[in-house]
Amino acid sequence: MNIDEFRQRERPSVVPRGTTPELRAIAQDVVRMSALTGNESFDWYNRFLEAAIKAARRHLDQQTGVLQAPFSPDEAVRLARIKCIMIEARIEALTEVLMLPKFLLENSAKARAQIDGMERDAA
């Protein structure tokens, strides 16, 4: 699998905002289960990332509340929109990073063989 295939792979779907908290928790656990590697160090790292993703989602929910408040000043709404965009980008980036250890472990032998082949060709 090359980097283009990695970027085009099927990604965990985003849970719609209208779902109940229980369904959101289940969906978040599925993402974590799909990222587990069996390597204790990577799995600990993934749990740390999952906690960061959950914290970012809570922060996003708070900012969404500011957007939905009936009498928010225009400046507060503008700042909340900017924060929501930044938090959504953070969640997306953390989710990508969460999947990297598994990708690296699954494809490390193939990558090592390609690197060895390029080193032989260069020599």
Image (cartoon, rainbow, N blue to C red):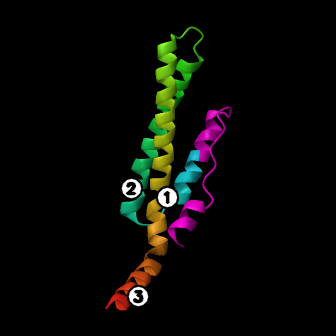
Relative height, residue 57 to residue 1 (above, below)? above
Whole-percent x, y for residue 113 in the image: 43, 84
- Report x, y in % for residue 96: 49, 54
User: Which residues make up the magenta segment?
Assistant: 1-27
Regarding mark 3 in the picture, which secondary structure is present there? helix
Mark 1 lies on residue = 99
2 within the magenta span? yes
User: Can you tell which quarter of the image residue 71 is in?
Assistant: top right
Q: CA distance from mark 3 to mark 2?
A: 33 Å
Residue type at mark 1 is Met
| Comparing labels 1 and 3, the label whose residue is closer to the camera | 3
Question: What amino acid is found at the position of numbered circle 3 in the picture?
Answer: Gly
The disc, 2 or 1, on the residue closer to the chain's N-terminal end is 2
- The residue most toward the top is 71
Rounded to the nearest angstrom, the CA distance separating label 2 from label 1 is 13 Å
Q: Which residue is mark 3?
A: 117
Q: Nearer the viewer, residue 10 or 30?
A: 10
Indicate whether 84 appears above or below 99: above
Mark 2, residue position = 44
Calculate the distance from the C-alpha at mark 1 to the C-alpha at mark 3: 27 Å
Rendered residue at 46%/29% (across/down)? 83
Q: Quadrant of the N terminus?
A: bottom right
In the image, what residue occupies the spot 48% across and 65% down? 102
Do tag 2 and tag 1 residues touch (Cβ < 8 Å)? Answer: no
